Every structure is written in structure tokens, then in C-alpha cells.
Amino acid sequence: MKTIAVFRKKAKVRKEVKKHRRFTLSTLAKYGWSIVRGVIILGICFLILYPTLVKLTVAFMPEKDIFDVTVRYIPKSPTFENFKAVWKAMGYTKAFWNTFKLSALTSIMQLISCTLIGYGFARFKFRGRGFLFTLVILSMIVPPQTLMVPLFMHFRYFDIFGIFSAITGGRGLNLLDSYWPFVLMSLTGMGLKNGLYIYILRQFFRGMPKELEEAAYVDGAGMLRTFWQIMLPSAVPAMVTVFLFSFVWQWTDSFYSTLFLQKTKVLSGALSSVSFNITQQIYFETGVNVALPPAISSMYTNTASLLVIAPLLILYLFAQRRFVESVERSGIVG
Amino acid sequence: MTEKPLQQAESVPATKPLIRKKRRLSLTKKRAMMGYLFVLPFIIGLITFFLVPLIQSFIFSLNNLQVSADGSGYQLIPVGFGNYNRAWNVHATYKRDLVEALLYMVTNVPLIIIFSFFAANLLNQKFRGRSLARAIFFLPVIVTSGIILVVDSGDLLQSAMGLTQSDGQEGAFRAAELTRLLLQSRLSPVFIDYIVSAVDRIYDIVSASGVQILIFLAGLQSISPSLFEASNIEGATGWENFWKITFPMVSPLILVNTVYSIIDTLTNSSNTVMQLIRDIAFANNDYGMSSAMAWIYFVSILAVIGIVIWLISRSVFYQE
């Protein structure tokens, strides 16, 4: 009996010690920090999502809800009217396909060219490598506006060593309003923000262990085969990142698309002229020339920009895992 | 025919080192050739779509460019530095826009760097829902890029329903309380202004930090855990670990991210100078002055980046 009592007492003491231990300062600090961190992260997430949420609520509001002071976030009588109007005004289906074709084409080509170039800079020693890489950085620094006029002229009267002008007798080919300017610039690693992609991929390849390649060489693989079978499969995470960047940035780019495409409609151009198009439409339908109130034209613009980013959000939803993982597996930084 | 190989076989011991040397040399040469082959697309692009247009644009800036009426070509009328003079001294807003863009960059970039470094450290810790938080933190790369940024930045409803507002009338987040608190703590007013304006522009800053967070995060994860283990055994606190290990190890990336942020804020499509240059060229058809403006802008960006690189690279820690 006595022994049992002693055991009980010991157990009690032990329990108390355990209880006591749970509330030491360091554990308190740990819990405190995780709460603070949670609040900070939630706050920033809210901040990031907020404008998109605003777009979402505005898009479903009928006109009278916009001017209704009692309506702030949740529309009283949600409608699809805005979407219908904007869809028509943007010529969404056609603009979507044009943009999709353009973005897919350029991002795939940029991915190919930047991977090759990045690998070349990372793994081969040749004369002028450092200088050429400085030029990669320089091509990022130069604002595209500096090159805008010459590039425009270049593709307006496109020529390679005077071959085309000799054939047609004119002053070169007019490549504007085709995808050729994009294709040519993407293939040569000169497209939108390609300097950044080259940099990312170069850093990735540099971070990969040299032993991998050496083992492949010892086993008798050539340089191309080593690249294709050893380096490329392990570079997939970095390539996903680059692909996502280039697809998204081409999708929302308005600089090159308005510079090279004047008749072909893409989403970014359609977005910036959406409220103008709606007034035009109203004019054609009713014969009345109305000026949209600023709030209403803003409502249409928000709906339209939601339609522009919706496909990207869906893409991101699928690619997000790979994308975040690619950071996880590191290597972007050498 | 049969004699030659034999002879060679006999003389192998004497020439062996020679042969080996020759072979190694040819391999490095071969590798250099492969290197050029891989980089060849870039060299072509660099010359045709970068260097030539760059020089051309400089020539344009020294001339008045007139597109002939039948669309068959264009003519150049030399005007010397007249376009530069017009852009700098005659144009009503160019000088002010340029200075404002540079000032905006100078105030924003440090905040972007601090925020993205902080956010990367947060996202590097282990907690529940981390991958979701990461997905949301990188979302600005999509929702505030290109045309979306341009459309949103002047949008009426976005600012009416926005979290922050420059006049502080109805924003859900008001910095007035913060200002009072900081004033009571006797901080210098300049510093308070900076912090309060940072709070007002928090969305701009957060939305411009997507790529930077990504780069910092990748850098944080490339730090070997054994460093932290060793310092923990020695009894270092988390604070010390941060300043003695994390910070020096990521410091090269601060340089990278600063340069990237400068380029990004100065050349994104919602920048007023960029829009001005565009409009002058295609709305006014004044290609010469547009090129001159673009060149002034380019040179000032180059100068800023040069200064920044010089300042930061002195205090950066490199492992090699």
C-alpha cells in the first residue's frame, strides 16, 4: 500500500513538472510568434487578394448597385449582364484564341531558346563569355521604349541582307500584324524579359553538380545527349517557372502587342479599349451617343480585367504546385 | 600501310604525353565550340534585335524622321542635338516626369527589398498552410502584370473600394493612428513621413515583390542546414543566427534583387515616362524626340544602377 502511495506521489510530481515545463518562456514565445506570424500572413494574403475580390464583386453588380450607398461588397441582385456586355465588346472568344496562340507560341519558343542559352552560359567556357553575359544583363536594363521605333521600322520593312527587297522589288516585307516579330525575337532570346529567364536558367544549371555530367561523359554520352538526357529532365522545375512567367507576361503584355499587332485583336488591347467599345455599341444599337459615367466604365473595365486574368488564374491553379515546388528544390540561385 | 601503325606503336611511350595534351586541348576547343553553338541564338538576337536597333535609335534621336506618304520608307533629316534640347528644355512635363519616376523608384525599392526579404523569411518557416500562403504571395506576378497594372492603377472603383487611399478619406486602413503613435514616440518627422507613406502604398509594394520573394526564398533554401546546426550547438539564438548566417549568405541576392526592382519599377508599363515616350512616338509621330527621351531615360537608369551596384557590392559577402 505504501509503495503505491509513493508511486502516486511521484507520478503527481512528474505530472506537475511536465505541466510546468509546458509554460516556460521559450514555448510561450514560440506560440506567441506563431500567432503573430499567422496574423501577418493572413493580413498580407488579404491585401494581395483584395483587388481581385473587388473585381469579382463589382463584376456581378447591376448598374444601380454601383450607385447604391447601402451596397458595399455584396451585390443586391447579382447579374451576368456585365459579363455579357464586356464579352461582346471585347470580342472575347476571338481575342482569347489570338492571345492564347500568341502566348503559347512565344512562351514555348522562349523556353527553348533561353534554356539553350542559359546552359551555354552555365557550362561551357569560351572566349567572350563574361562579356556576352554582361550584354544579357544590359538587354534587361535597356527600356524597351528605347528600341521601340527601330524595331517597328525593322519589322515594317523586314529584310535579311536585302534578299526580300531584291525579290519583291519593294522595301522588304511587312511583318507587322503577324506573329513573325514575336517568333523571331523569342527564338533569339530577345523577347519580353528574356534576360531574366536566361539569368534564372543559367543560375539553375550552374547550381547542378558537375559530377552528373562527368559521369555521363565517362559513360560515352556526347555533349548534346548529356544535355538532352541528363540536364533537361532535372531542369524541369526551373523551366516550369520560366514557362509560367513568360506565358503570363506575354498574356498581359500591352507593349509589344500594340507595337506589332494593329489589326489582330488580343486581350490586352481589348481590355484597354473596352469601355470605349461599349459606348460605340450603344451608339450603333440605339443611335444615342452616351458618355458612360466614370463609375460604370470602371465597372466594365474591372469585369473585363477579371475576364483577362481568369484563364491565368486557372493555369496558375494547376501549375502552382510545380511552381512552388520549383522554389523548394531550389537552384534558381547559384 | 602496315608499317605506319607499327611505327606509331613503337614510338608511343615517347609521344604519349604529347598526344594526351593535344587531345585535351581539342576537347576544350570542342567544348568552346559547343558553347558558342548553344549561345548562338542569343548572339544573332543580340545583333539584329538589340545592338542594331540601339544604334539606330541613337541615330534617330539625332534626326527628324519622316515617314514618306506612300509608305515606301522614311527619311532622316539631321538636327544634331536639337531633339535632346527639345525633350529636356521645351517639353512641358518630361523633366518633371523623369525626376518623379526616379524619386518614386528611390523611395520604393528599399521598401520592396525589405518587404520581400521579410516575406521570404516568413514563407521559409514551417507552418500549416504554407504552400497556400506561398501560392498567394506569388499571385501578384499574375494579377498585377502588364496591362492589368495599367488599368488598375487609375481605376475609380478600385480606389473607391480600396484598402488605402492617398487622401485617407475612406480607406479601410487608416494611417492616422499610426502617425500619432510615431509622433508621440519622438521620431524625426522625415522618418515618420516615410513610414506612413510606405503604409499607404503597401499594396504597390507587396504587388511589386513577387519575383523578389521567389529569388530570396530560393536563396534561403540553398543555405546548408549544417551551418545552423553547428551554431545552435554553440548556443546561438535565432536572432544571432539570422544576422550571422542568414543575412550574409543571402546578401549577394540583395544586389540581384535591388537591380531587378530598379529595372522593374522604372520600365514597367504603368510608368509615366514610358507612356510619355510611347505617346510622343505613335500619337504625335515625333520619332526623333521620342528616341531622344528614351535615350536620356536609358542613360539615367544606367547611371542609377551603376551607383547602386557600386554601393552594394562593397558590402556583399561572397562565399568564394
Image (spheres, rainbow, N blue to C red):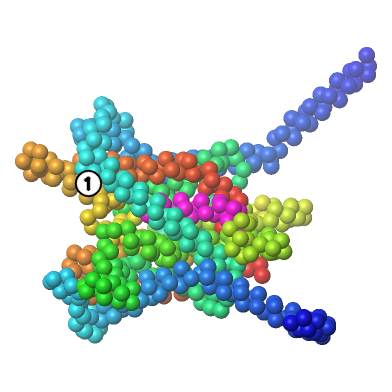
Q: Is residue A10 above or below residue A106?
A: above
Regarding mark 1 in the picture, which secondary structure is present there? helix
Identify the residue at image location x=27%, y=28%.
A78
Identify the residue at image location x=48%, y=71%.
B40
Identify the residue at image location x=93%, y=14%.
A1
Residue A186 coordinates in the image, percent (x, y): 41, 62
Q: Work out whether residue B310 or residue A137 is closer to the camera in this orientation and state it.
A: A137
> Considering the image in quadrants, where does the C terminus of chain A appear?
bottom right
Can you identify the residue that label 1 sits on? Answer: A274
Task: Report the span colored magenta.
Answer: A231-250
The question of residue A296 being in magenta is answered with no
Residue B214 coordinates in the image, percent (x, y): 52, 53
Q: Is residue B169 visible?
A: no
In the image, farthest residue toward the left: A287
Q: Secondary structure of the magenta portion, mostly?
A: helix
The question of residue A235 being in magenta is answered with yes
Q: Work out whether residue A182 or residue A310 is closer to the camera in this orientation and state it.
A: A182
Identify the residue at image location x=35%, y=53%.
A102
Quarter of image, res A74: top left
